[in-house]
Amino acid sequence: MKIQAIETIILRVPYTTGGSADTEAWGGKAWKTADALLVKVTTDAGVTGWGEAFGYNVIPATKAAIDEMLAPMCVGRDPLIIESLMRELQQKLHIFGRGGPVIFGISGIDIALWDIAGKLAGQPVHQLLGGRRLDRLPCYASLIRYSAPKVVAANVERAVAQGFRHIKLHEVEVAPTQAARDAAGDDVDIMLDVNCPWSLREALDMAAKLRPINLRWLEEPVWPPEDYAALAQIRAKGGIPVAAGENAATLLQFQRMFEANAVDFIQPSPIKMGGISELRKVFTLAAAHNVTVMPHTFYDGPGLLAGLHVNAALGQGSLVEWRYFDLEQRLYGDAAVPRDGSIAVPLGPGLGMDPDPAVVARYRVA
């Protein structure tokens, strides 16, 4: 059996977030739609696998990397020799960077190949990884940045009413963060992702101001994100557990974070750092360093499902990140939506479900 074709599909789905969102914080322009890049891999035996590659405003570059470089190298190859093929792609294309669109594209293809492997075996991916430990996994609601304290509070109250006991903010000021704590009460975990804005000194000063809010973790507090020594200092002196990792692209970067004692929680993103093949290695490496993995899954497609399967098989105390968007339509309908703060582990072969063809057709733009 051979890989016959690799197709990239751009989706653009309208969404709301429960209020005015300060989305210009990422990528220089407001997000009017939740954009996704799907990767469809078809074999000459008629088996199709679905993956997802990062993402958002970088989609045109990632799509070009897949269409022009990665797909021609994969067509005609055995879809079941996944790790060997992925290593070959990384080695041959390393001169174009060990992060960014090339690795994003590899991630999407890898996830699709694991989907194919599961379908051929008649087993869900988590079974290929050793079997699931739970039928349902606890989630945290990952909110967009609102900036306005009243809007933050309203959305925290909404999430708590829906059963979430863990909520992540993307604020960068004390007032909206305090508003979230006041709205949630003391029994709900509040996490704060600030997206790499501060110097070491600024981060330590902000940690002192945030400490009374009792955050579960402070995520990516320093610029640049690969300054693991600075993260280690914040972890040692800031008085708040530190989380990071969504911007790491290789296993070696994760290893160096652990060696630097930089994090309490590690956050690999399956569609940014090599897919399922690499994500499962991070879980193993983290276990050796007594660090909890909290996969970055701010997605709604195969990237979310990939994180679910690896989490179900290998996670220990790992939460699922749920993007707290109200999408006009979802790729899997209601089949992959949390209920009372937890989400069911897919049980079908491969990733467990395929995107709804009607949804793909309606929101496809390229």
Image: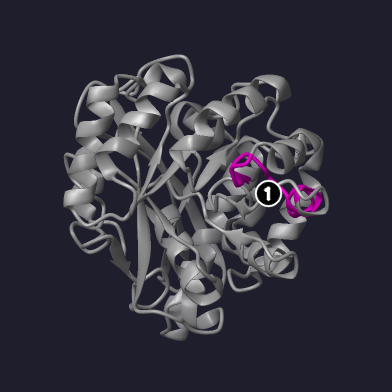
Left or right of 263 in this view: 168: left
Q: Which residue is at the front of the view, 34 or 183?
A: 183
On screen, residue 102 above or below 2 = above
Q: Is residue 243 magenta?
A: yes
Nearest the eye: 232 or 13: 232
Quarter occupied by the C terminus: top left
Q: Is residue 221 left or right of residue 11?
A: right
Bin the neighbour count of mark 1 within 10 Å (Cα to Cα): few under 14, some 14-19, many 20 and up: many
- Residue 323 versus residue 241: which sits nearer the camera? 241
Q: Residue most toward the front? A: 212
Magenta-highlighted residues: 239-257
Local secondary structure at mark 1: loop
From the top left corner, tell me how far across and down residue 139 is, in percent. Answer: 36, 58
Name the quadrant of the N terminus. bottom right
Picture colour scheme: one colour
Question: Mark 1 — residue?
Answer: 263
Q: Would residue 51 be visible to someone looking at this image? A: yes
Q: Tell me the residue at 68%/45% (across/down).
A: 249
**Which residue type carries mark 1?**
Val
Q: Tell me where residue 87 sits by quadrant.
A: bottom right
Q: Residue at x 76, y 57 (%)?
A: 88
